[in-house]
Amino acid sequence: MGQKVNPIGFRLGVIKTWDSKWYAEADYAKNLHEDLKIRQFLKKRLYSAGISKIEIERAANKTKINIHAARPGLIIGKKGVEVEQLKKDLAAITTKEVFININEVRKPELDAQLVAENVALQLERRIAFRRAMKKSVTSTLKFGAKGIRITCSGRLGGAEMSRTE
């Protein structure tokens, strides 16, 4: 079997940066679990907004959360009402003061996470896997990507298989 290297871990510190930016000696495990809970909560709650990345920065008693979303309007809501509600819900998860920054993903068709979620959503809606994969590949290349590779595996078309496009 081929030796596979995690694409994020392979690039960390070279051309990619960490998703969590903080340092702790005593509370490391607590902070790590808190980060995981925050990410899981935000992913589930804001799935329709197209979340591509969540960055968490900690300093003393402050937690800064940067959310990269395809549709930031859904997160912000009318006059920022949704953001305030989100802050209250996050304050229940973490003990520190929470600051939220929302960044827009300019071209969601070029973001790997968003393309993958789009293909997964199409598969859940019972669209043919070949059509879903081909459509994503063509639209991504049309938006100026240098290359794209999609792998789907599991029960596709009633049989246990894996396909790469």
Image (tube, rainbow, N blue to C red):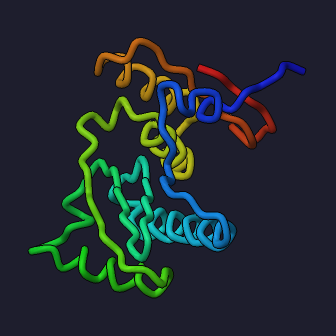
Residue 86: percent from the left, percent from the top? Answer: 33, 77
Residue 128: quadrant of the picture: top right
| View extreme (right): residue | 1
- What residue sits 69% from the left and 68% below the top? 29
Quadrant where the N terminus is found in the figure: top right
Q: Please, is residue 2 above or below residue 109 in the view?
A: above
Residue 18: image location, x then y, percent? 51, 44
Q: Tally the numbered discs.
A: 0
Q: Residue at x 51, y 54 (%)?
A: 20
Query: Which residue sits at x=55%, y=65%?
Result: 35
Name the side, left or right, on which 70 lies relative to 89: left
Question: As drawn, is 23 to the left or to the right of 28?
Answer: left
Residue 46 against residue 66 in the figure, above or below:
below
Q: Residue furthest top?
A: 146
Residue 32 position in % (x across, y down): 62, 65
Q: Nearer the viewer, residue 146 or 127?
A: 146
Residue drawn at point x = 41 percent, y = 47 percent: 52
Location of residue 143 with respect to 60 vertically, above or below: above
Along the line of sight, which residue is nearer the eye, 77 or 13? 13
Query: Going by the image, does 98 lie left or right of 152?
Result: left
State the image coordinates of residue 130 (x, y, percent, origin top left). 57, 27
Say left or right for 137 vs 109: right
Q: Is residue 94 above or below residue 126?
A: below
Quarter of the image for residue 75 reads bottom left
Classify the position of the C terminus by image quarter. Answer: top right
View extreme (left): residue: 79
